[in-house]
Amino acid sequence: AQTVTQSQPEMSVQEAETVTLSCTYDTSESDYYLFWYKQPPSRQMILVIRQEAYKQQNATENRFSVNFQKAAKSFSLKISDSQLGDAAMYFCAYRSRSGGGADGLTFGKGTHLIIQP
Amino acid sequence: KAGVTQTPRYLIKTRGQQVTLSCSPISGHRSVSWYQQTPGQGLQFLFEYFSETQRNKGNFPGRFSGRQFSNSRSEMNVSTLELGDSALYLCASKAEPHGANVLTFGAGSRLTVL
């Protein structure tokens, strides 16, 4: 079974600075998807960024980018120019490509990101 | 386009009772999945439905069940409630049941079992 580990329960960053959230995963598969989701205090989970394992290029969405190291099974999220609205729980998630995606997402425990004004 | 709608948003039950939660996916989305979120266990996959068929189920006891209707709306049911079933239940939908497709989550149903 796949596992996803987020080793930082909480991170704090000054507004406008850059922060990196860590995520490692364990899988025997070679083809899969990785996601970062954000859950603000309102509780609605929002997709931040997605990475397909067969793509070597790191995904980027505006101020959010990932560092995907497939051999190391690492998938970190970098948030540049942090804003107050970035404060939330961030979850790293894995999904197998096989089985038609029926296995559901495997989530890490989350990292609580605090933005200091 | 309306998002994923979950009802009720909050509910309180007592041990031994049963509960039914409802989820209306985004219009046009035919795949619905359910997740349980607790402080201790985090987010765990419950099940996924497509075209009224359960495609997969997570590691939960048989007290947890679900179904999907022809209009893609889904319900999940928990029977003989236990204190440990207190959780936020999240529903998510996507257009097709392919791994590449992104899940859109609802706001959740907060269940408290007393």
Image (cartoon, coloured by chain):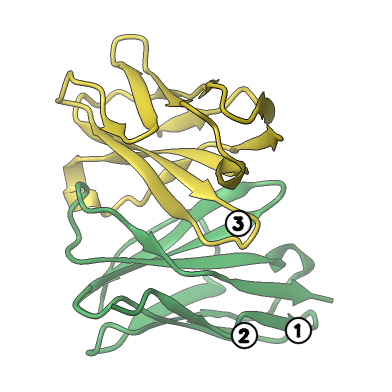
Chain colours: A yellow, B green
The quadrant of the picture occupied by the N terminus of chain A is: top left
- Closest to the observer, B8 or B19: B8
What residue would you read off at disc 1?
B13
Report the amino acid beneath label 1. Lys
Q: Which chain carries label 3?
A: B
**Upstream in sequence: badge 2 or badge 3:** 2
Q: Distance between the residues labelled 2 and 3?
A: 16 Å
* Co-location on one chain, circles 2 and 3: yes
Q: Distance between the residues labelled 3 and 1?
A: 17 Å
In percent of the image, x 59 and y 60: which residue is there? A43
* Residue B37 image label: 3
Q: Which chain carries label 1?
A: B
Report the amino acid beneath label 2. Val
Q: Does dot 2 land on a helix, a strand or a loop?
A: strand
Q: In this view, does B90 lie above or below B3?
A: above
Q: Does dot 1 land on a helix, a strand or a loop?
A: strand
Q: Does dot 3 land on a helix, a strand or a loop?
A: strand
**In the figure, residue A76 lies in which quadrant?**
top left
The quadrant of the picture occupied by the C terminus of chain A is: top right
**In the figure, residue A19 lies in which quadrant?**
top right
In percent of the image, x 69 and y 27: which residue is there? A12
Q: Where is residue B74 in the image (x, y as percent from the top left)?
A: 37, 81
**Upstream in sequence: badge 2 or badge 1:** 1
Q: Are marks 3 and 1 in contact (CB under 8 Å)?
A: no
- Closest to the observer, B67 or A35: A35
* Co-location on one chain, circles 2 and 1: yes
- Residue A5 left/right relative to A57: right
Count of numbered circles on the image: 3
**Upstream in sequence: badge 3 or badge 1:** 1
* Residue B19 image label: 2
